[in-house]
Image: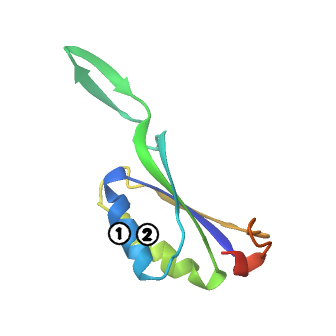
Amino acid sequence: MKKVEAIIKPFKLDEVKDKLNEIGIKGITVSEVKGFGRQKGHTELYRGAEYVVDFLPKIKLEIVIADDQEEETINTIMKSAQTGRIGDGKIFVTDLRDIVRIRTGERGEDAI
């Protein structure tokens, strides 16, 4: 089993969610987060004063999948979240040792 975490631009959330649903992903956890990567934020002008916006708004998706869904999930997120501009985001994949569904006690892939 794998946990896929993706950091994407907020306006891409609906498109990514719809495409993941099309390939059979049943559950996604979504968080509003702030951060920066190589772009290091940007400067803005507000009421005549210039200030630096270090942390940009992003969306973090967390998806737990079976091993055989890994490549399709990554490719789907990449294609649907990509704008070709700086700050499109990142995808992180980690191995999961176990999953437990609290309500039923099911474990492993049965709990996904």
Mark 1 near mark 2, Cβ–Cβ under 8 Å?
yes
- Picture disc at residue 105: none
Q: Residue 33 at what x, y percent from top left?
A: 49, 43
Task: Quote the CA–CA distance across marks 1 and 2.
Answer: 5 Å
Q: Quadrant of the image for the C terminus?
A: bottom right
Residue of label 2: 77
Q: Which quadrant of the figure has residue 110?
A: bottom right
Q: How is the image coloured?
A: rainbow
Q: Which quadrant of the figure has residue 82?
A: bottom left
Viewer-side residue, 94 vs 21: 21
Residue of label 1: 80
What amino acid is labelled 2 in the image?
A: Ile
What amino acid is labelled 1 in the image?
A: Ser
How many numbered marks have been drawn onto this rendered protein structure? 2
Viewer-side residue, 99 vs 94: 99
Q: Regarding mark 2 in the picture, which secondary structure is present there? A: helix
Viewer-side residue, 46 vs 42: 46
